[in-house]
């Protein structure tokens, strides 16, 4: 069974990544390559991780005019990763263009799944109100942006686990909710505000969870990963 627990590889160098992955023997992981790592190491880090048999969520959160995003997605599609994303705040036309770019650039019949970031888990209502001048309730904003993503033909969204059930209730369980902001009990929440445990994320209907420091900074990352699997998959 494919893992629905994605490990955020929030490292700066290829060597740190490989040292981390070497701790997992005979396991096919699902990992997230974000901006920090991709901008530091380039596409070669994706190729290296793929060689080791791991699935990849390439988390670059594209956000630009539609044509620019389309052309960028055509290039990213050549990397043959499993999942990519854009910012839902770019609008429906931009999200449709991203999907078109993936379709045009895909390798063979395989198109990476594509999801849209709703409200980052570092944001809360106070930031929406006073910094972004978005005065609608946060849940309403998240649901509207998720609805826009579905209208654009995307496969799902990135959202807080606290909003996953709301989205599934309105848009259906087939619409993916990929939820960061996951911490094992006792872990620090760091710079995120809307967070839960893996067990609560499961209860709140998250399709997939993204776990970073609770695994990567653990004394025993392998044990922490399997604890997340146990809690989220109910093993």
Image (spheres, rainbow, N blue to C red):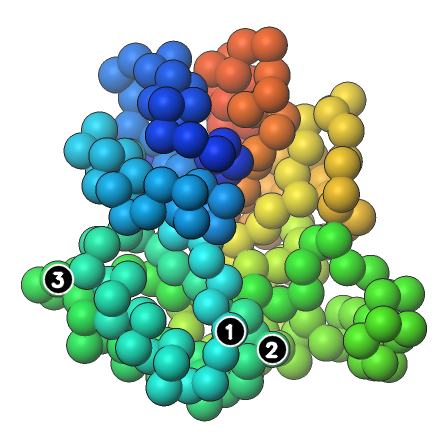
Using the rendered view, name the quadrant where residue 3 is placed. top left
Residue 94 location (% of width, % of height) = 45, 84
Under circle 1, the secondary element is: loop
Q: Which residue is drawn at 51% across and 73% down?
A: 63
Do tag 3 and tag 2 residues touch (Cβ < 8 Å)? no
Under circle 2, the secondary element is: helix
Side of 15 relative to 88 (left or right): left
Asked if residue 171 can be seen in this view, the reply is no
Closer to us: mark 1 or mark 2?
A: 1
Residue beneath disc 2? 89
Under circle 3, the secondary element is: loop
Residue beneath disc 1? 63
Q: Residue at x 54, y 10 (%)?
A: 220
- Marks 3/2: CA distance? 28 Å
In the image, residue 213 above or below residue 200: above
Q: How crowded is mark 1: few (under 14 residues within 10 Å), some or many (20 or more)?
A: some
Do tag 1 and tag 2 residues touch (Cβ < 8 Å)? yes
Using the rendered view, name the quadrant where residue 52 is placed. top left
Residue 87 location (% of width, % of height) = 54, 70
Side of 217 relative to 194 (left or right): left
Name, please, the residue furthest toward the left. Answer: 108
Name, please, the residue furthest toward the front. Answer: 40
- Marks 1/2: CA distance? 8 Å
Give the mark, 1 or 2, whose residue is nearer the N terminus: 1
Number of on-image labels: 3
Q: In which quarter of the image is the N terminus?
A: top left
Closer to us: mark 1 or mark 3?
A: 1
| Nearer to us in this view, 141 or 170 | 141
Name, please, the residue furthest toward the bottom. Answer: 93
Using the rendered view, name the quadrant where residue 142 is placed. bottom right
């Amino acid at each position: 069974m494919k893992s629905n627990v994605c490990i955020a590889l929030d490292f700066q160098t290829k060597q740190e990544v490989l040292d981390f992955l070497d701790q997992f023997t005979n396991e096919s992981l699902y990992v997230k390559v974000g901006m920090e790592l991709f901008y530091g190491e380039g596409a070669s880090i994706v190729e290296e991780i793929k060689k080791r048999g791991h699935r990849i969520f390439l988390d670059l959160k594209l956000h630009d005019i539609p044509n620019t995003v389309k052309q960028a997605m055509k290039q990213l599609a050549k990397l043959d990763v499993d999942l990519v994303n854009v910012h839902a705040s770019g609008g429906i036309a931009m999200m449709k263009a991203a999907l078109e770019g993936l379709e045009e650039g895909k390798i063979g019949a395989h198109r990476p799944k594509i999801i849209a970031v709703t409200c980052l888990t570092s944001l809360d209502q106070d930031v929406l109100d006073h910094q972004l001048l978005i005065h609608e309730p946060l849940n309403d904003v998240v649901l509207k942006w998720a609805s826009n993503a579905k209208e654009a033909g995307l496969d799902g969204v990135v959202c807080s686990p606290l909003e996953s059930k709301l989205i599934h209730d309105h848009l259906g369980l087939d619409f993916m909710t990929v939820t960061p902001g996951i911490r094992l009990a006792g872990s620090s929440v760091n710079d995120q505000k809307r967070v839960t445990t893996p067990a609560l994320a499961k209860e709140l209907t998250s399709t997939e969870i993204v776990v970073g420091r609770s695994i990567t900074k653990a004394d025993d990352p392998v044990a922490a990963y399997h604890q997340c699997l146990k809690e989220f998959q109910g093993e």
